Image: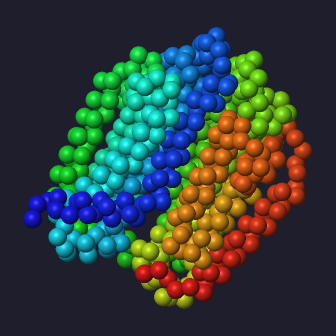
Amino acid sequence: MSALTGAGTLARLALRRDRLMLPLWAAVVGGMVASGAGSIGALYDTPAARAEVAASMNANSSVRSLYGPVFGDSTGALVAWRFGVFAAALAAVMSLIIVVRHTREEEETGRQEMLSAGQVGRRAPLTSALLTALTANAAVALLIAAGLAGEGAAGAVALGLAVGGTGMVFATMAAIVAQLTESARLAKGLTAAVLGLAFLLRAAGDAGGASALTWLSPVGWAENVRAFAAERWWVLLLMAAAVAAQAGVAYGLAGRRDVGMSFLPARPGPASGRLATAGALAWRLQRSGVLGWTLGFLAAGLVFGGMVEGASDLVGDNVQARQIFERMGGQSGLENAFLAAMTGLFGMVAALYVVGSVLRLHGEETSGRAEPVLATAVGRLRWAAGHLLIAFGGSVLLMVAAAAGLTLSYGREAGPVLGAALAQLPAVWTLGGVAVLLYGALPKAAPAGWGVAGLCLALGWIGPALDLPQLVLNISPFGHIPKLPGTAVSWPPLLILGALTGALVTAGLTGLRRRDLVT
């Protein structure tokens, strides 16, 4: 039996298990970029307008740190500038989740040991995971290339390959980390930390004009393909070399360890327990995530705060661009609209944190770690309450950190910015409540909470640019949040969302009490 025996069967199984998640990811990442041509073309409909915005963006270091430099003034080049970096980062997140899910997570739950008892080679699980990631990234690349083909076939293919190639770089990186660590959570966290560092290196390099820093980042490689602007095809060879080298290391490591083992085993805990309550255990499990998210929100707030005063330069005299900001952030002045749009974006991202923190309950249950805890005097509600307190309370900390970053960088009075940030919480908590309901009542459908949060993020992010009807935007709870600062607080929507959150959480916890544990 060869080391790859059964890889095809495992790959088909992985695609079957991810038949909902993969198309959703591909549609969000690829569709976001492909839809950009229409919005950019409507905003800057003349060569002079495109040349002007390209020059102004390149002159603004804060904007360069966020989106990167503009390498051309065609519609395709502006789409690549506006969406390319974020699409590459999302493809990287998608890829690391896929690879860790089908390698380390399978071993952690014990399913891989059962599969390996059959006709399965030692390196077949890793191969199937990488094939699944390759399929997802190929779908993203095809959607981008097809959606932007009208702007130039060469540029569309280059951008699609750049985004998909970045995803595969982080897929193979996650494959290495999955061999080194003993838990799926740590593998995802470490790979995500590398992605965050790569994004910061690119941002610092682009903001300061230090190309060496940008070239140290795989995310920076994606922008340096220069789609729609005298494409640098050789950069794709750099990505391919990184993928091949990292895959080789991962395969070498996979052949030298037993199933379930790792090269960096977890340290044993203390001889006597120090966690006296279920809440303390939940905090111990989630504290690193809370700290990482908080620091990320603070850093992002500092970056966005530095862009507020340049909002006028960012929009210029373009009426359509001003209307987009006003749809996102209200009509109370451009700077207030920009602040409101940014706090809304922070709220939508905070919803991803809340959903992930709530679904930690699902991970603890399906991995079998919850059962020993619940076999003691700890009840289900008390066990769940510890994680929910961290999920919902942690979102408050995140929004306060974002407001602090915006205030420190912009130099504005803290009160209005903090109020705008905290006003997002009812919508954030509503999406958290949906995750609680799905977990408690329909545990097999619990991962769909990510899809609900992703849909709301997409509506809030690209909905105004696509000029979607307000009725569609109101599908998201963020469509009902008052546009602060600059307008009066409308309390009824906030109270209704708060009551809806309470109802969703109550229904979810009721379902958790009445159903059997997932085994």
Say which of 5 and 439 sits in front. 5
Left or right of 17 on screen, residue 85: right
Left or right of 487 on screen, residue 302: left
The picture quadrant where one finds residue 180 is bottom left
Q: Which residue is outermost to the front?
A: 150
Query: Which colour style is shown?
Result: rainbow
> In the rendering, at what x and y percent does residue 393 appear?
66, 61
Left or right of 244 on screen, residue 108: right
> In the rendering, at what x and y percent does residue 288 appear?
50, 57
Q: Identify the residue shown where x is 74% and y is 33%.
A: 325
Say which of 21 and 512 sits in front. 21
The picture quadrant where one finds residue 218 is top left
Question: Can residue 196 be seen from the camera position used here?
Answer: no
233 to 469, vertically: above or below: above
163 to 260, vertically: above or below: above
Quarter of the picture containing the C terminus is bottom left
Q: Identify the residue shown where x is 47% and y is 69%.
A: 363
Q: Which residue is outermost to the top?
A: 48
Question: Can residue 13 be seen from the camera position used here?
Answer: yes
Quarter of the picture containing the N terminus is bottom left
Q: Identify the residue shown where x is 47% and y is 80%.
A: 518
Q: Identify the residue shown where x is 66% and y is 81%.
A: 510
Say which of 431 and 282 sits in front. 431
> In the rendering, at what x and y percent does residue 50 appear?
61, 16
